[in-house]
């Protein structure tokens, strides 16, 4: 419990330095959601809403990809062993049934290879390579959208910064004098939008890198399994 309180206090201090909490609120127990709500209003809904939408939509695509990739991850060793046993006991059709009942891109690639098994190993290899490219494209679906939101969020934040500075100088021009109270409004909008945009980009970048590493792992297992699958078919054809 003490560790949680210490972390909460440290995070509140960070928000104070980042501009999300006023210095007077650091020593007070202010709910985080209330702090974020206040800063959203202070930053201006015109600038903050698109940035928050980037976060929400980006996280939605990230969660969808993570769920899809977790479902696509299968044990290639078990699948290879099951296909080999099916070939030995029931032939090509039995191996097809194993692939039909197994989820994931690797099983789909094996099935396409088995469909071309009667046309020779060269056709099997071409089929495996071609369908492997199709499966890679499916694994990378929606990644361009995540990359777009990563680039868009800080850009919108910087846009708010520029517009906030313009507002500040416009207020100075209207007042005919320069004082902290006149500049504070525009500067606050500028700082809040910039910090929010950068935070959104950092969060989405972490998820994006995780998804990329997950895809790389699946692709590597697909390539290794495809080589072993061709070897298994070669052994099966030699026994005929």
Image (spheres, rainbow, N blue to C red):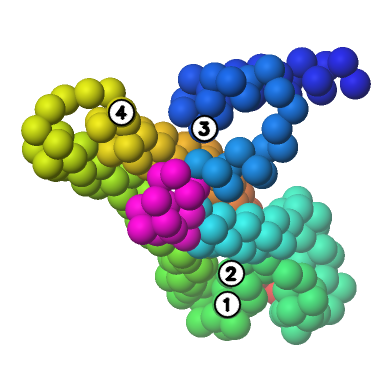
Q: CA distance from mark 1 to mark 4?
A: 70 Å
> Quick check: is 71 in the magenta stretch?
no
- For marks 2 and 1, give the CA distance: 5 Å
Where in the figure is residue 5, as x and y percent of width and height? 80, 20
Can you identify the residue that label 3 sits on? 20
The picture places residue 206, in percent across and down from the top left corner, at 52, 39
Residue that numbered label 4 is attached to? 181
Q: Are marks 1 and 4 in contact (CB under 8 Å)?
A: no
**Relative to 66, residue 99 above or below:** below
| Tag 1 residue | 112
User: Which part of the image, by quadrant, shows the C terminus?
Assistant: bottom right
Confirm whether the magenta stretch covers residue 48.
Answer: yes
Q: Earlier in the sequence, mark 3 or mark 1?
A: 3
- Distance from Cα at disc 3 to Cα at disc 2: 51 Å
Highlighted magenta segment, given as a residue range = 40-54
Q: Percent position (x, y) of residue 24?
A: 58, 20
Q: For the residue labelled by badge 2, is the local secondary structure a helix, a strand or a loop? A: helix
| Residue to which mark 2 is pinned | 109
For label 4, the SS is: helix
Q: Nearer the viewer, residue 239 or 228?
A: 228
Q: Residue at x 28, y 38 (%)?
A: 186
């Amino acid at each position: 419990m003490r560790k949680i309180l210490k972390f909460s206090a440290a995070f509140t201090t960070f928000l104070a330095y980042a501009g999300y909490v006023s210095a007077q609120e650091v020593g007070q127990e202010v709910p985080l959601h209330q702090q974020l709500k206040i800063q959203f209003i202070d930053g201006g809904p015109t600038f903050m809403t698109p940035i928050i939408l980037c976060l929400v939509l980006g996280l939605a695509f990230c969660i969808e990809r993570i769920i899809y990739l977790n479902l696509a991850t299968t044990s290639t060793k078990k699948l290879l062993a099951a296909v080999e046993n099916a070939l030995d006991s029931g032939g090509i059709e039995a191996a097809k049934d194993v692939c039909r009942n197994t989820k994931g891109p690797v099983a789909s690639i094996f099935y396409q290879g088995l469909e071309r098994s009667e046309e020779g190993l060269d056709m099997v290899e071409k089929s495996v390579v071609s369908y492997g490219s199709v499966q890679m494209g499916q694994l990378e679906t929606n990644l361009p959208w995540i990359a777009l939101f990563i680039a868009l969020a800080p850009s919108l934040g910087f846009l708010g910064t520029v517009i906030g500075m313009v507002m500040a100088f416009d207020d100075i021009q209207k007042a005919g004098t320069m004082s902290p109270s006149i500049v504070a409004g525009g500067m606050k909008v500028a700082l809040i939008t910039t910090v929010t945009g950068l935070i959104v980009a950092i969060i989405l970048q972490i998820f994006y890198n995780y998804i990329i590493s997950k895809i790389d792992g699946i692709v590597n297992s697909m390539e290794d399994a495809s080589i072993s699958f061709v070897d298994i078919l070669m052994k099966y054809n030699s026994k005929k």
